[in-house]
Amino acid sequence: MNNDAKWWKEAVVYQIYPKSFKDSNGDGIGDLPGIVEKLDYLHELGVDVLWLSPIYKSPNDDNGYDISDYQDIMDDFGTMEDFEHLLSEAHDKGMKIIMDLVVNHTSDEHSWFMESRKPQENEYSDFYIWKEGKNGNAPNNWGSWFGGSAWEYDESKKSYYLHIFSKKQPDLNWKNAEVREKIYSMMRWWLDKGVDGFRMDVISLISKTDDFSDGKVDEGIYGDLAPFCINGPHVHEYLKEMNEKVLSRYDIMTVGETTGVTVEEAKKYSGKNEDELNMVFQFEHMELGNGKYGKWNDSPIKLSQLKEIFDKWQNGLADTSWNTLFWSNHDQPRAVSRFGNDGKYWRESAKMLATCLHMMRGTPFIYQGEEIGMTNAGFESLDDYRDIESINAFHELVDELGISKEKMMLYLKKISRDNARTPMQWDASEGAGFTEGNPWININCNYHVINAQKQINDEDSIFNYYRKLIKLRHEKPAIVYGKFQMLIKESEELFVYERSYEETVLTVICNFTDKNIPCELLREREDVLISNYSNRAVKELRPYEAIVYERKCR
Ligand code: GLC
Ligand code: CA
């Protein structure tokens, strides 16, 4: 009997980016009835939990991550009835739904902010982080993560407010107990409606230090606000309070997006006492290769470094906490384009990456389209981009820091968030089965080749491979609970590890290259649990080959 067993450890999560999932009414924007139409598809894939990126009322400055009403649905996506229908249909099929909780900031069009900016003192005056300017300038040199200063002057209040993201996303003042109570009651309202948990947006940023001095300037003119805002002094106190007052009262799943988290911090967010969150997203494997312009660069990454990060997190959280496993989400480029090969070995590498991730310890998250091997957008013109971060970064790097346009277009093609935000490719019809209208963002032109319809009935498809992986996880406790051990750490070609649980040992061998690579661990007599090649490797792994052996030892 496993005392640590929990349903959310055994679950596989599927992230839906509603705007690009399925449009039901031809306006070119995905919506809630569209998701309902595709529940059978998700059920067939076998996932247990759906995470919906924000569906709340929003002026869409940052595609719904700027919320103007937490208790209403974005017009583009439908109505509250549509949501309730989706929730009950998903529940009927045995799938849970977790919501994106975006409470580090609201939209500047949220009624709290509209009240807060009024010159007359009122209940909301202190709901945001207001500071006086210094000699006619912003309170300090902090730079927003979406470009420009992190402070915006408000004419009516004659004061500056902090916005880590866009100026339409003012940061809430979590020091104010009233703010926290309002958020908790909103959370209870959703949980009482029956939602099954939350993914908490940039939750590691909610507590700022009292020190508002200048940040370190690396490149350009703005200072780094990270040391003042990430894992701040009261963040654990707030989450413990949230847990006590809300989370602990429901049987739900919680996952924090914890930008800048370390293993030590993660143990606090998701520790043994279970008094904060169930698990957190760490981003070290996503940030590997970041350079002087942050994520905007095109330097290659070393496999040994990638493995070192996984090794550290797999073992670091083994005794006290729980990992999340992901290669992609709506903020990252497509996994197969980034870590695999989206040309000749598209199919093999997509399956290899899936094997490598899904056999590890933690809860796997699949980002929509990953299960059919969707690739980066490949946009050639800045006009094709919709993402505020990408567009602002283009102007900042090209106009202010002097990077050439061509170079920046390459960076966008490689790393922009829009790479993963193109519409889901359902079939080969015009509109890719996503819409009958004009899509809000271009559809990847490879939808004739890469689409769900083609893969559902193809035994050898990436989709059916994901199905197998998910099924295996549901059947084999070793995949969920087994101990993790990295092997041949120094290899720059192979990612190899073992999972052991009671008498079962799984050996996972993945080739991250397009070459044949010899490997002494290949065994002829052992049971192959799953592999992306139909015949067995003997002495060497073929390009992007993945193979998992299962052995019993007593
Ligand atoms: C998170 C979201 C991202 C958003 C940002 C601000 O990182 O995943 O999409 O832009 O927070 O809310
Ligand atoms: Ca629509």
Image (spheres, rainbow, N blue to C red):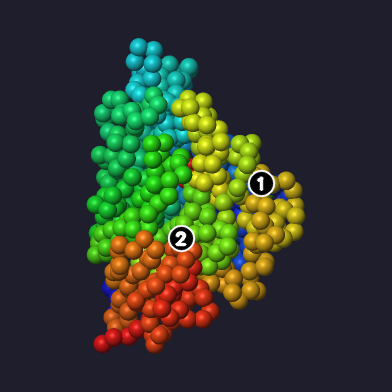
Query: In the rendered view of the protein, which quadrant contains the C terminus?
Result: bottom left
Q: Residues within 10 Å of mark 1 (few under 14, many from 20)?
A: some
Q: Residue 299 appears at what percent x and percent y? A: 43, 46
Q: Residue 503 appears at what percent x and percent y? A: 29, 83
Could you say which quadrant of the image residue 233 lies in? top left
Q: Residue at (30%, 29%) from the top-left corner?
A: 216
> Compared with residue 381, is residue 439 higher up or lower down, i.e. above or below?
below
Q: Secondary structure at mark 1?
A: loop
**Distance in Å between CA atoms under marks 1 and 2:** 25 Å
Foreground of the two, 401 or 85: 401
Foreground of the two, 468 or 71: 468
Q: Is mark 2 within 8 Å of ligand 1?
A: no
Q: Residue 313 appears at what percent x and percent y? A: 30, 58
Q: Residue at (30%, 76%) from the top-left corner?
A: 500
Label 1 amino acid? Asn
Depth-wise, is mark 1 or mark 2 nearer the camera? 1
Label 2 amino acid? Phe
Q: Residue at (58%, 59%) from the top-left corner?
A: 343
Q: Secondary structure at mark 2?
A: strand
> Compared with residue 121, is residue 91 higher up or lower down, i.e. above or below?
below
Q: Residue at (36%, 33%) from the top-left corner?
A: 173
Q: Residues within 10 Å of mark 2 (few under 14, many from 20)?
A: many
Circle on res. 442: 1
Q: Is residue 435 visible?
A: yes
Badge 2 is on which residue? 365
Q: Is residue 110 visible?
A: no
Q: Residue 60 appears at what percent x and percent y? A: 57, 38
Query: In the rendered view of the protein, which quadrant contains the N terminus?
Result: bottom left
